[in-house]
Image (cartoon, grey):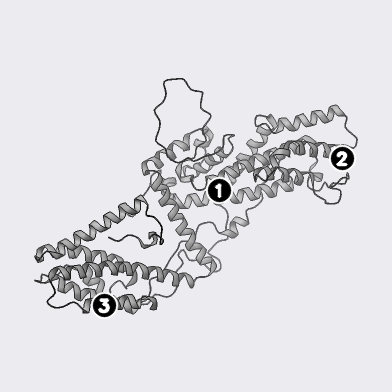
Amino acid sequence: MLRPHAQDRQPGELPSLRDRVEDLFHKAFWDEALEKLSDPTPAVQLPRLKRLYEDLHTALQPLLPVNHPLLIVLSSPLSPTSSPLRSAITHLRETLTCLRERCAPARDAQIETLIRHIGDLSSIAPGEDTARLVVDTIRSTLQLSEAMKDDLSQFVLGTMDEKQLRAVIIVQAQQRERELVLELWRPEQIQESWAKWLVENASSQTIGEHPARRMWVYRLVHALGLFTPVSCPLPTTPIPASAEPTEKAPVSNMLPPSFFFVCPTLLYLQNYLQALVIAASLRSLVRLPSVHAASLDSAAGGDDSGDGRTFMSRIWTLLKAEVDMEPGAGDTKLVNLADEVVRVRRQFGGADIDVEEEARLRAAVDRTLQPHDPVFRLLQGRLMQAVAERVARPLDVPSRAGGARLPERLQTGREHSGKRPRLSAEMGPIEDSAKANEPPLAVKGFEDNVLVKALQEALVKLRSCVGWTEEIWQDLIEDGSLHIRADQ
């Protein structure tokens, strides 16, 4: 039983409550081992020694070939003997000698010290001293094995190219994300919230007409289309309800725990897609023909006379600044949007508009920013339906049958008996190049080139979130249940 070295405290850092509890458990573990091995009766020593051998076997497996004699000794039943500790001393000396042949030069001094301590043991040393040496040596060997694994990982990572390193980092990040979510929520909570979320606020069309495995994508896009911000709050202890009547709670748009880490990105996409709808609604106010929508410049004069920016690009710049929460964007957004609409109406209308017409235009801009505006709702419905259908379909990627076939696992180095183990990482199903090549999506009302490009960026980001979630929570998505490994 060894505390993971990666979690060791920095010098001068105060221990946390968890650290103190772990330290107490570890001390009790080794004290109990010392007590058992100090017993002069072999029948008491052998079972405890066998358990320590099993710990050594587990720790050394990644460092030694499968059929290495040392692993066979550590995993075999202990032979009956009148002096188990003396046999253990011999096995520990062989273990340290084996590790010295495989360790980095920086570990030589540590191993030599341990071997020297074993050699200094007197043949007439008391049994308690021998037991203490065995316990201390096993504990140090376990620590040494963890350090050697780190050395090995650093060496193997150093031989990888950037693409291989990125694959390894992605796999580790996904594993860590799943572990953290499972620490915050119980598995049954995750499963229940997922099942409830799938059918919550979902239309009968969403439930009945789409494959069950991809239904969650439609449900996610449906959540992004609601006007309540998506959220995934941490679990809390419920407070007993008060007897006094309370105000009606707003419509919830809470995502299940599996979206905890991607929720900030999903919230950004929710605002981003709403901004796209607003931009398309404003475009409908000025009634620009499609031939002019992508090429209308600022020929009307003013400060923008020479920059060639389109009406839609200026509108989108203002809206995206609001989505990106740039300083001062929210203070001038409405008036700037109205100014742009009035300006382009004057330019494209062929005649000056009167004061009443300008007032009507500004009022129309104000209405367009309201989520219950009929035009807004119509355009949003088209957009979200198209986005859901696009993202729910797997992205077409070049066939791996033609040309060089990408390995399903990255394997660095060749496998030789007695050499370092292979480090492998599974590649994700969606490559970066495929994400970058997301084809444009044609949606009625969003044909302007500025909107097409902006929508394509949103699709890439949303597909990335979907793919990331699907890789981490594949069991939950496919079966509705979590397959928990013993180490989770």
Say which quarter of the image contains residue 436. Answer: bottom right
Numbered disc 1: secondary structure: loop
Residue 115, numbered circle: 3
Residue 271 pos. (x, y %): 62, 41
Q: Amino acid at mark 1?
A: Arg
Q: Earlier in the sequence, mark 2 or mark 1?
A: 2
Say which quarter of the image contains residue 342. Answer: top right
Question: Eyeballing the image, is 78 above or below 267?
Answer: below
Discs 1/3, front: 3
Answer with left or right where residue 108 lies relative to residue 79. Answer: right
Q: What distance separates the C-alpha of mark 3 from that of mark 2?
A: 89 Å
Badge 3: residue crowd in 10 Å (few <14, some 14–19, many ≥20): some
Q: What distance separates the C-alpha of mark 2 from that of mark 1?
A: 42 Å
Residue lying at 41% horizontally and 71% vertically, measured from the top left: 151
Residue 48, numbered circle: none
Residue 484 can be seen in this image? no
Of residue 12 and residue 74, the one placed in the foreground of this image is 12
Q: Earlier in the sequence, mark 1 or mark 3?
A: 3
Q: Residue furthest top?
A: 244
Residue picked out by circle 2: 347
Q: Amino acid at mark 2?
A: Gln
Q: Residue furthest front?
A: 12
